[in-house]
Structure formats: structure tokens, C-alpha cells
Amino acid sequence: MENKSPLDSLPPWPADDFSAYGPVEAKPVGKIQGFVARAMHRNWVLIPHVTHHDDADVTQFEHRRKQWNATNPEQKRTLLPVLVKASIAALQRYPKFNVSLSPDGATLFQKQYFNIGIAVDVPSGLLVPVLRDCDRKSVDELAREIVQISEKAKTRGLSVAEMSGGCFTLSSLGHIGGTGFTPIINAPEVVILGICRTQERFVPDEEGRPVLKQFLPLSLSYDHRVINGADAARFVRAVAEWLETYDFA
């Protein structure tokens, strides 16, 4: 008996003459955007996604970061390289997140290395360069590498090798905004962490008085075939707590 995909039973994509409703301009989908679209479609259809949302209290983190930048103007630090290190700390604490699933779903490959992908918004679409052996690099080394590889992605493009071998991906919209989203897993990885813009809001202190704090929205999408919800919540908490106690010295 022939096995049919659930997609085979779907009605065909609606074909319409849009010019009947008003002026239109037909443009071909770019090569990179077309590749990304196919990969995202495959990942969304084949991976059972669940997204866990949480906030990291980065009030003291931001205070320490601004202090560091004020006293080290030649070596200013941003959030993303520190998030790379926070993610590695969480991966080391919870190794089940640093795995890949075989195409047939029968084998888990436990990785002993820590390569982190960084989603980069480029004019032609979305590219994800992979930073190698991030556990062996300092925050400042990662910061320089992120700037270099992001610039290359936006200007000259990246090779397949430069986008392969990742363990975990970070997708940041913090420079734009948002309060949360559902990032699509970058197969064959099993998790991806989305980051939005830091939010300010008042929360009560121990005596019930309002205190203004800064919170960083974190959105972790995970493959539910491999990761369960409780572990996802613990993982995001580990990232948040690492940031909350990070010392810039």
C-alpha cells in the first residue's frame, strides 16, 4: 500500500488573476529567498514545533553593561555575543538540547562541540552563519566574529560550509522590536532561541512598592519529538539566570 503524505489531500494552491482587482507587478522570487522559503516550509511541516516564552530580568545586566561601556569605550559590549555564551552555558547544563535527530527519527546524535548560528537579515532574504567552537572564545572574540560574518553575509554572501554544522541558533529582533514570536527551527537542530527588544515595566518589590525593571523577551522553539515542555522551561530559565548574574569584569 502506498504511503501518502497528509499534504496530498490538501486542495491546490488558489490561482487568481490579481490584475482583475487592480494594478500589479509580477516579480520573481530571489534565489536566496526561494531557498530559504523551501527550507522553512520543510522545517515547519516536518518538525512538531512548540514555543516557550519567558522574560529575563536584565535590569542589573544592563546597568553593568553600560558601566563597562562607559569605562571601556574602545571595547564596548552588546547583548548578542553575551547571549551566545549564555546559550552555551545552558547547552552544557542541558546536553539533550545539543543534539540532532536522524532523518528517520530513529537516532539522536549527541554533540560534544558548540557551534552557534546567528540569523542575519540580508537584502535578499535570511542567512544563518555558524560561529565555530564558541565555548573556546571570549565574548570580545565572538563580538568581532559576529560583526565580520554579518557584514560578509550582507555584502558578499556566505558559502554552504559557513552555514553548516550548527548546534543552536539565535534569532534576534531586538534592534527592531516585538514582544515575542515563534522562530522556525533550523534543521537538523532541535531548538532555536528568539530574542525581542528589552521592555521596561513596573513590578512590585518585597514591600509591594513599584520598581521599574528591564525585561528581555525570550522565545524558545523546540522539536517536541526530542524536547518536552518542562525541560524547555528549565533551559530558558537557565539562559535568563545566566544573564541576570553575568559579570562584565
Image: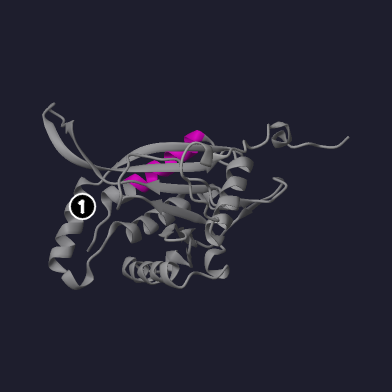
Residue 74 point in image, percent of width and height: 19, 73
Residue at position x 43%, y 68% in the image: 136
Q: Quadrant of the C terminus?
A: bottom left
**Residue 95 or residue 165, whichever sits in front:** 165
Colour mode?
Answer: one colour
Say if the magenta span includes residue 74: no
Q: Residues within 10 Å of mark 1 (few under 14, many from 20)?
A: some
Q: Main secondary structure of the magenta part?
A: helix
- What residue sits right under mark 1 in the picture? 62
Q: In x, y percent, where is residue 105?
A: 69, 45
Mark 1 lies on a secondary structure that is: helix
Residue 245 in the image: state x and y as whole percent: 27, 50
The residue sitting at 68% across, 32% down in the picture is 10
Q: Nearer the viewer, residue 182 or 111?
A: 182
Dividing the image into 4 quarters, which one contains the N terminus?
Answer: top right
Instruction: Determine the residue positioned at 38% across, 58% down.
Output: 85
> Taking 63 as reference, is 112 above or below it?
below
Q: Residue furthest top?
A: 208
Query: Could you say which quadrant of the image residue 137 lies in?
Result: bottom left
Query: Where residue 209 sits in the image (x, y, percent)?
Result: 11, 29
96 left or right of 80 in image:
right
The answer to whether residue 36 is left or right of residue 147 is right
Q: Which residues are magenta?
A: 229-240
